[in-house]
Each structure stands twice: as C-alpha cells, then as structure tokens.
Image (cartoon, grey):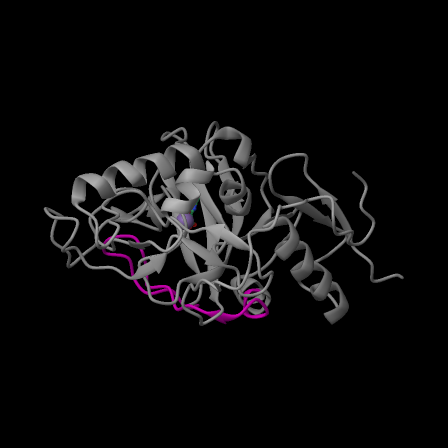
Amino acid sequence: MADQLEILRLPYACGAEVRGVDLRAYSDQQFGQIRAAWLENLVIVIRNQNVTDDQLTSFGQRFGVLDELPPVGKGQKPRDNKYISVISNVIEDGVPIGGLADDEVIWHSDTSYREKPPSASILYSLKLPAWGGDTGFANMYLALETLEPALRKKVDRLEIKNDITYNAGGQLREGFEPVKDVTKCPGAIHPIIRTHPETKRNCLYLGRRRNAYIPGLKVEDSEALLDQLWSHATQDFLNWHHKWKVGDVVIWDNRCTMHHRDNFDPKTHRIMHRAQARDDLRPARDFTVPDTPHDRGRVYLGNVAL
Ligand code: OGA
Ligand code: MN
C-alpha cells in the first residue's frame, strides 16, 4: 500500500522510529499507523520534519484535547499559538524565550500533579546544543513487570500524592510556597499502579520523586517505599535515550513512561517547541486486569525492519 509507513522498533526497552511521513500532509490511514506505533512502542520519533506551530498543533490535536500552555519563561509574553510552549535556554533582551533552561531535568511524567494529566507530549527540535541535552524515556510497563514481587504486593492498592510546587527542573512555580511537610503540599492523588485506558495493561505511575507522598503512611515509611520504587524504576535497562537531530518530532505516552533530560552546554542554544494532549481521564486502576508481560515482539506494524 502506498500509504504504508515504516516502523522501526529500536533495540531498547521502548521507542520506535516512524519513517515515510511528512507531518504537513498525511492520510488518516497513516495517522492510524502512527498512533498504533505510539501505543505499542510508548515513544516514537519522526525525523526530518519541517513544521510550523500551527501544523504541530493540528498534528497534536489528533492525539487528544490539547492543553493550553502558558508561557513558561519568567516575564515572557503570551505566544500567538496558545497550544505551543517553548523549551529553551535562550535569553532575549533579558527574558527567557522558554522553560527548563540548561540543567538536568529529573525523571518525571508530565504534570502528574493534575487530576487529568496529559496522555501525549510532543517535542519538536529546532536548535541543538554542542553537547548534552539527550532525552531519556523509561518503560513503566516493564518497570511493573520486573518489580520485586513483595514490593509489587505492598504497593498494589497504594496511591501517590503528586506535588505541584516545583517544576521538573527544580524551580519553585510562581505563587507556591516552598514545601515543609509533604503530607500537606498541594497536588493530585493517583494510583501507584494504573491501568492504561487504551492498551489495558498495568504499569507503574510514579509522577516525580520530589515531595511525593503515599497517603496513609508515616512520612518515613512513605519515603522508604518511594525510594525503593524509584531506584527500581530508574534503572538503565528500562530506558532509551534519544540523541536529537534538528527536525525530530518525538511523541511519548505519559501514562506509561517517564522521561529525563541530560544537562547541556550552557554556552550554546537548544530550542524545542512542545505541545501536549490529554485523554481527559483520571489515571485509574482496573482491578479486574491482571499484570501482563510486556512483550515488545508481539505486534507487527507496517514494515518492521528489526
Ligand atoms: C518536557 C520535557 C525534556 C527535554 O518537555 O516535558 O521534560 O528534553 N522536556 O527538553
Ligand atoms: Mn517533561
């Protein structure tokens, strides 16, 4: 079929490259393949793209309801397209053009402190630094599958309060007070094990480590349990790091992955445009669904070349 895309599964715990598509013009059938590859591989990369903010927005809208993204840089003016935010260390006339600067960004799932967090995040690279700035993605189905059974049992019905106070770069959000007591800080409460609403598979859903709290436990017990979960979920075998090229569009599924960014050369510039779509659902656990092994070789999509 002329419309058929190539899906190249990457030899890591998650990730696939989708080839043969131009995001300025694609068919519904091709979008169907992109979406299926995303669900199956958790993260997809589409290289060599050249899209405007509006084209990125229309692509993003096909994944769900786009979140409006306020300007992230302090003092930054609203952008023309309210669905696109900028991730960058560039400063123009003393004002950052985007967020997250040039530091390491710790492992997290996007805006898990909301009641209805985004399902898809989309990042498009326009300018890259001399070194660093790779983005890592970790497979949370596999994290659950490989969790030590006693720990798996212990967290079965527990939840995490996902603190909103700091962003993933560690900066205090405007209008929030520094956290003194994790039991009191604001943020949504979600199950530690969630059932993905589309794939119907269970996975770990940890949000981010900073100021996380397991309601009902003593703070020291919550800290100890969270430390165990995090040291498991951030192991190398669960992740894949993407080395960016200009023109890459990467789409990840926040429901079943976490991501991390390496720091990068602060003397050079990195510019990414970003959109996020939500499925408009609260993360939930379906207790009738058993854990299933995450078999990456199971589904074939397009011309699988690996
Ligand atoms: C994000 C994010 C990482 C990066 O956009 O949500 O965490 O590589 N970005 O810039
Ligand atoms: Mn993020």
x and y percent of residue 276 in the render? 46, 61
Observer-nearest residue: 49 or 296? 296
In the rendered view, does 272 fall on the left or right side of 211? right
Query: Can the viewer see residue 23?
Result: no
Whole-percent x, y for residue 219 in the image: 17, 44
Residue 24 shown in magenta: no
| Residue 78 magenta-highlighted | yes
User: What's drawn in magenta, residue-wise?
Assistant: 60-81
Q: How many marks?
A: 0
| Residue beneath the point at 33% across and 41% down | 101
Quarter holding the N terminus?
Answer: bottom right
Q: Position of residue 104 (x, y in %)?
A: 36, 34
Image quadrant holding the C terminus, namely top right
Residue 113 visible, this orientation = yes
Q: What secondary structure is the stretch in magenta mostly built from?
A: loop
Could you tell me residue 271's position as x and y percent? 45, 45
Residue 191, quarter of the rendered image: bottom left
**Residue plotted at (46% across, 34% down):** 133
**On screen, residue 272 above or below 57:** above
Front residue of this view, candidates 281 and 57: 281
Q: Is residue 202 left or right of residue 98?
A: right
